[in-house]
Image (cartoon, rainbow, N blue to C red):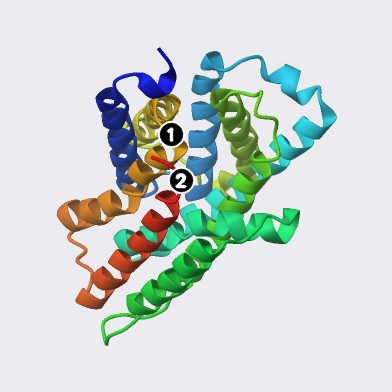
Amino acid sequence: MTAQNRPLSLADAMLAAAALLAGAGWLFSIQAIREIPPLIFIGSRFLVAGIFVLPFADDPSAALRRSSQAAWLLAAGVMLGASMMLWIVGLKLTGNPGVAAFISAMGNLMVPLVGAGLFGWPVGRRLRGAMVLAVIGLGLLFVGPAAAVDASHAIFAVSAGLWAASIAFVKKVSTALTATTVTAVQLIVAGLAILLVALPLEGGAAHWPTIAGLGWFAASVLIATCLRFLLQFRGQQLVSAGRAGLFMCFEPVWTLLFSVVFLGLMPTPFQLLGCLVIFLAVFSMAARERI
């Protein structure tokens, strides 16, 4: 029985849970950085998560011994680290993580654009249509007297672009490498790169967090990173890439719901409409692949 012919209900549940955990990761991170310096938090989170994922991966040294593979993997890890540094700074500054999550979701649309600019990937009509929708959605986020552009919005947008670059670089890596191997290397490289920047900047401000702070850190690492990626990878093995992408589109939806329910941050009607339009743009791109 092939992977595509296995029961899809289990795979669907895994991917739905992965999207939910990814959304919950925003909430966990918000709570954690109240006690832990943001760069130290995100660097430690990625490094520890990479170490946890490593036992499930093939021998990464085999990939790193191939100079071309090593270059793309390391570049992707550094790009991911830069993206996450900006993401956590934006999260520290933002007044509405639910809206910010939809700005970050633009990274999914930027991947083929970055690939087109760097590697000459073709840009199809569907992508152009999705980008028009996304730009309209972004505009709606900032309509109305209660909405305003702030520094965090620009930070999240740049973070999304760097994240897209990291994905484009990963696509240059041989498909012979498993997803867990690539992810383990990326997480470890990104974590180390972030900590190299974080320790000189935040080392003096670091202090031992409370039990609650450690709990939020543990939840971020074990639940929102390790468990999320394991569920996502296993689900992706059982269904097509298009179907997996459709489920992962719901990450910002969960983030928005969690920010409303647990943080009391209600977006304006125009922002809700903008989030819906961005979701439709991202969803339409994921749906282009055969489900």
Tag 2 secondary structure: loop
* Disc 1 from disc 2: Cα separation: 8 Å
* Residue 109 marker: none
Can residue 96 be seen? no
Work out which quarter of the rendered image holds the C terminus and state it. top left
Q: Could you say where residue 230 lies in the image, as x and y percent from the top left?
A: 42, 25
Local packing at callout 2 (Cα closer than 10 Å; few below 14, some 14-19, many 20+) is few
Where does residue 240 sit, x and y in percent of width and height? 43, 34
Q: Nearer the viewer, residue 194 or 259?
A: 259
Tell me what residue is drawn at x 39 percent, y 38 percent: 244
Left or right: 272, with 219 as reference point:
left
| Residue placed under numbered mark 1 in the picture | 240
Q: Say whether disc 1 or disc 2 marks the residue closer to the N-terminus.
A: 1
* 106 or 202: nearer the viewer: 106
Question: Looking at the picture, how far across and down is residue 135, in whole percent?
Answer: 45, 74
Above/below status of 136 relative to 30: below
Residue 268 coordinates in the image, percent (x, y): 22, 74
Outermost residue, bottom direction?
145
